[in-house]
């Protein structure tokens, strides 16, 4: 299972929110590159970079941060937050993103999102399926849609999606453990999906459990920043997994 630390960006700084609420913003580092280099030094190869300013503005904002991390590290970056147009994607890929994550766009403008799958291929486009009570949430989690999580994801698998990041919003930033039962349910219903678990990771012991369920990757944010999981533990996990 891939270990994918998260860096969330507001005003060019590395921050974390709780349950997607901008009022809960906590700055962990003024310099995201410094954080990314720490991850790389621990043997981590992947990074989930979220442009929270972009999510609010509904267009890419922090592409310079993406470009800096992409040019000064070897991390494979998936980038999300406010990507709405072909131009946003062009900027993201030109700035060094290996993959992009589309969330709200997949609900609000499915034709655009499907065209990205066709244009860029299933390895480049990740579906961000963030859920509250198994309903898809959109617009930086500020809105709930009428879409049920599993049928929504299934439809996009039929349209060619492979990678899906699923965050259970109730768990995000709470450090109370991930949504094991939700991921189990998803993987039983959608065995072909490359499911990336996100939200709620609170201790190292949860990672092997997610791997056992069949998750392809897991995104870890606050647990690293609050020293609940050490980079040394992640380094050892990666070495042993290989």
Image (tube, rainbow, N blue to C red):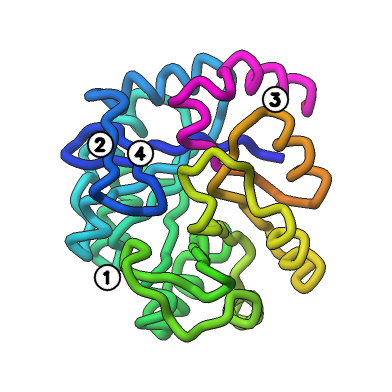
Q: Residue 192, how many percent across, how many down?
A: 76, 66
**Which residues, given as a range, are shown in magenta?**
219-241
- Nearer-N-terminus badge (2/3): 2
- Nearer-N-terminus badge (3/1): 1
Occupied quadrant, residue 34? top left
Say if 161 sits above or below 77 in the image. below
Circles 2 and 1 in contact, beta carbons < 8 Å = no
Circles 2 and 3 in contact, beta carbons < 8 Å = no
Mark 1 secondary-structure assignment: loop
Count of picture labels: 4
Separation of residues labelled 2 and 3 (CA atoms)? 26 Å
- Nearer-N-terminus badge (2/1): 2
Say which of 230 and 132 sits in front.
Answer: 132
Q: Residue 170, how many percent across, how many down?
A: 51, 57
Q: Which residue is mark 4?
A: 16
Q: Is residue 148 magenta?
A: no
Mark 3 secondary-structure assignment: helix
Q: Which residue is mark 3?
A: 238
- Nearer-N-terminus badge (1/4): 4
Mark 2 secondary-structure assignment: helix
Mark 4 secondary-structure assignment: strand
- Give me the disc on residue 65: 2
Separation of residues labelled 2 and 4 (CA atoms)? 16 Å
- What main secondary structure does the magenta stretch of the protein show? helix
Q: Residues within 10 Å of mark 2 (few under 14, many from 20)?
A: some
Q: Residue 58, how many percent across, how many down?
A: 22, 65
Q: Quadrant of the N terminus?
A: top right
Say if 144 sits above or below 55 in the image. below
Q: Which residue is mark 1?
A: 85
């Amino acid at each position: 299972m891939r270990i994918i630390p998260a860096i969330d960006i507001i005003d060019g700084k590395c921050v974390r929110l709780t349950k997607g609420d901008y009022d809960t913003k906590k700055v962990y580092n003024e310099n995201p590159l410094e954080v990314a280099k720490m991850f790389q030094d621990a043997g981590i190869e992947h990074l989930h970079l979220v442009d929270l300013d972009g999510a609010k503005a509904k267009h890419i904002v922090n592409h310079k941060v993406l470009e800096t991390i992409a040019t000064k590290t070897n991390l494979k970056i998936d980038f999300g937050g406010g990507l709405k147009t072909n131009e946003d994607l062009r900027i993201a890929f030109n700035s060094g993103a290996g993959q992009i994550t589309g969330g709200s766009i997949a609900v609000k403008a499915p034709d655009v999102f499907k065209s990205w799958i066709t244009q860029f291929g299933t390895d480049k486009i990740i579906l961000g399926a963030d859920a509250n009570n198994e309903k898809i949430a959109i617009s930086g989690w500020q809105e709930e849609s009428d879409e049920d999580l599993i049928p929504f994801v299934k439809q996009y698998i039929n349209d060619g999606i492979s990678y899906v990041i699923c965050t259970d919003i109730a768990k995000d930033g709470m450090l109370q453990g991930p949504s094991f039962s939700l991921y189990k349910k998803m993987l039983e219903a959608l065995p072909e999906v490359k499911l990336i678990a996100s939200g709620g990771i609170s201790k190292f012991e949860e990672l092997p459990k997610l791997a056992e369920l069949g998750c392809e990757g897991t995104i870890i944010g606050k647990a690293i920043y609050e020293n609940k999981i050490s980079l040394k533990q992640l380094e050892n996990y990666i070495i042993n997994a290989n």
